[in-house]
Image (cartoon, rainbow, N blue to C red):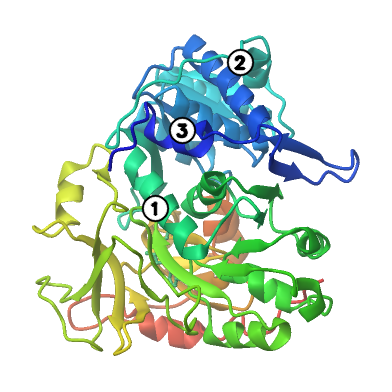
Amino acid sequence: MTTGSSNVLYDALLGAARDPQKALIRRPAPAAGGDVISYGDMVALTGRLANALVGLGVKPGDRVAVQVEKSAEALALYLATVRAGGVFLPLNTAYTASEVSYFVGDAEPALVVCSGASLDAVSVIAGKNGARCETLEGDGTGSLMDLAASQPEAFETVTRDNDDLAAILYTSGTTGRSKGAMLSHMNLLDNARVLVDTWRFTDADVLLHALPIFHTHGLFVASNTVMLSGGTMIFLPKFDADAIISLLPQATTMMGVPTFYTRLLARKDFNRDLVSHMRLFTSGSAPLLAETHVEFEDRTGHRILERYGMTETNMSTSNPYDGERRAGTVGFPLPGVSLRIADPDTGAPIDTGKIGMIEVTGPNVFSGYWRMPEKTASEFRADGFFITGDLGQIDEDGYVHIVGRQKDLIISGGFNIYPKEIELAIDELEGVNESAVIGVPHPDFGEGVVAVVVPLEGAKLSEDGVKAAIADKLARFKQPKRVFFADALPRNTMGKVQKNLLRDDHGAEFSEPVTLS
Ligand code: AMP
């Protein structure tokens, strides 16, 4: 792909000739009545921030690690980092200091940006790794913004080519070690172009954006797609059903995780009239239950468009815009993406309709895991296909179905959780012999984390005691919602814990509907 531009991603997202007055972000602030950041404002802000980054010593190729609340300024920091030739490294706001310490040690960023509340802990971590540390708050204030305020708007955008890195996003690791997925300018731009075309985004679109922007869904799928099309986003700091319901009349499109849709359906005032003007609802990051799809259509007349992707591959499949959006499927491979179902062990192709490993290749697929060449090599086939770890099948009409995850991943509230990491934390506790962590159906989060713990003989453990002991080690979304005790874990003849039996025992744990406002 030749773009003829000097910075492949930045130029496409913000460098295009556009009306500078056009609204990029509307933020509904009840007190001030809300405000608007135009495309012109955003270009100016990225210029000031890029100058500040350079002043802080960020050079082309340097990582900028960012753990901050969602804000227009945080999005500007992403764009400024790319514009300055840096590599944006967003971190989940729920990560604890010990988790941040791992990421900073692994990625060796030149700069870490955090909130004032975590400055004490994060500045020590940054200092140990030779990185500078600045703050940015959810309201757009902070030491980084103070520095930017005194900088000029003019900034000579740093040249970056297709294969240069634009971002590193850490994904949970099966062995407890997170891996940094390296995403190039071309990976991100190509996928955004494909999504603009496939989902028909234009500058008339207004996307209701309630996703976090530390994850591929909110940052790339939502924000890149809208910016590339010249549209507008209504930025909500997080999902809030009241706010969504009051703002839907101003929107044309919404992107969500399945939890958004189940929460909206729990509201009586979420009805056909409210959304009759909407153009598109999309869902992804976790499986959308076929029942939710059907209930949504019954209630609103809209068929949610479900798509499938992951941090490493960006978006790989989508249900069609015009054709049948089939419940319980993730649609067809996107243009330019090759997807196949293969034998998980050998990689040999599998017949249509049979279950196997989903493997993908195309310009959407990342270039590898940061400083993990062996891990990278083991997750690609010799012919370049990436082994996703998701098990699926393709039906005779070509729709891709996801049937499970080989990697034992739990997805709770749209966040990925690898049981191993939680098991390791529990196993370290005094009085614990071993543990197994599973995900079981949860009406609000999709899956809820449950731990089954085997105590050492004579040890006195309690559910609250275990929960409290790991509370400062793991992000809140990873902490088990329930802890059970057992004399032993069920194992098969190969010695593997039979988590399916544990899921059977505890599968109904969260079956009581939760009360939603
Ligand atoms: P992440 O890297 O956080 O985006 O998580 C990617 C994983 O989420 C995939 O490997 C899938 O297991 C899962 N996922 C994403 N979209 C869907 C979907 N529409 N249906 C089922 N699982 C999905």
Q: Amino acid at mark 3?
A: Tyr
Identify whether 77 is placed above or below 467. above
**Is the residue under label 2 in contact with that under label 1 (CB below 8 Å)?**
no
**Is the residue under label 3 in contact with that under label 2 (CB below 8 Å)?**
no
Residue 10: numbered disc: 3
Q: Amino acid at mark 1?
A: Asn
Snapshot quadrant of residue 266: bottom right
Residue 298's spot in the image, x, y percent? 68, 89
* Residue 115 in view here: no
Cα distance in 3D space between marks 3 and 1: 14 Å
Residue 496's spot in the image, x, y percent? 25, 75
Residue 232's spot in the image, x, y percent? 66, 48
Identify whether 187 is placed above or below 419. above
Frontmost residue, 167 versus 423: 167
* Label 2 SS: loop
Identify whether 215 is placed above or below 344. above
Label located before the other in sequence (1 or 2): 2
* Label 3 SS: helix
Label 2 crowd bin: few (<14), some (14–19), many (20+), radius 10 Å = some
* Residue 114 in view here: yes
Residue 68: numbered disc: none
Label 1 crowd bin: few (<14), some (14–19), many (20+), radius 10 Å = many
Q: Residue at x 25, y 56 (%)?
A: 362
- The residue beneath circle 1 is 191
- The residue beneath circle 2 is 153
Q: Residue at x 46, y 33 (%)?
A: 10
Label located before the other in sequence (3 or 1): 3
